[in-house]
Amino acid sequence: MIVMKNVSKSFTHASQEMFHALHNITLLIEDGQCVVLSGISGSGKSTLLSIVGAIMRPTSGSVEIDGNNIVSFSDYHLSHYRNKTIGYVTQSFHLFESLSVRDNLLAPLVINDLSSSKIENMIESALKQANILHKANKKVFTLSGGEKQRCLIARALVNDPSIILCDEPTASLDKKNSLEFIEIIRTLHKLGKTIIIATHDPLFEELDCVDRFYKMNEGTIE
């Protein structure tokens, strides 16, 4: 369960002006729910995802994941939390273009003390879930945009995280590939993953796999 209480986030610009990205966000997301955060660019949805994903800390408030307030975690424990609990899918692929799809999935696993057979099983499972196993040995630079997105999804899934965060996941995809991505989300939802999607894509409105739909505006949830 994710429980955010009075979460705010502010940034100071070079001009010393203060920008308030989030204002006292209080939000509860049950285990296994698929939640969509909708809003225009600058509404705060990506900042909220970054806080849940422990990429940044809130200025104030608490973020409890399964009863643990991750705001109080040390940097070391935050890194461990991200690696074990969070899978991140973004609109920018951030893949190693010169490496194969399979080798791209090794990155989240190298810090774990795992046998080679265990690593191979985890990679194969993630590739199957993302429907990209048939491209396992292809270099990333040879893939289409939709295939790169599926590679990114597989990398997000390789550690079997309980929480999947998707930041504008269809922004770089055409409608066909966007619909294929949604089918993967449906499958992950059935597997009991907690999924949070930040998007302004109308394709996500009223999907049968979405449990909650929140509208964000200027750092608040309407």
Image (cartoon, grey):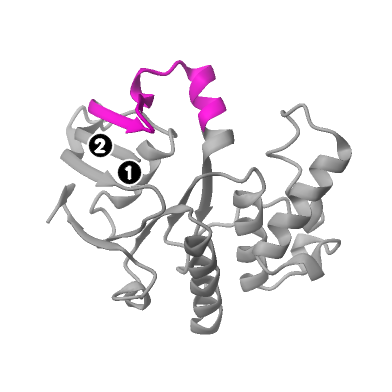
* The C terminus lies in quadrant: bottom left
Residue 98 shows in the view: no
What residue is pinned by disc 1? 47
Q: Which residues are magenta?
A: 60-81
Secondary element at image label 1: helix
Q: Label 2 is placed on what type of residue?
A: Met
Instruction: Sort mark 2 into few (<14), some (14-19) or many (20+) by Cα contacts within 10 Å.
Output: many
Residue 185 in the figure: left or right of residue 126? left
Quadrant into which the N terminus falls: top left
Residue 146 highlighted magenta (yes or no):
no
Name the image quarter holding residue 148. Answer: bottom right
Residue, x 49% and y 69% (percent of image)?
186
In this view, the residue in front, 40 or 63, is 63
Which element carries disc 2, helix, strand or loop? strand
Q: Position of residue 122 (x, y in %)?
A: 74, 48
Tell me which residue sits at (39%, 47%) in the image: 31
- Left or right, 136 with reference to 51: right
Q: Going 81% across and 41% down the picture, which residue do you hit?
A: 118
- Image location of residue 182, percent across then percent down: 48, 72
Q: Residue at x 73, y 70 (%)?
A: 143
29 sits to left or right of 5: right
User: Residue 50, image x and y in percent?
Assistant: 39, 41
Which residue reaches farthest bottom? Answer: 176
Q: Which residue is mark 2?
A: 4
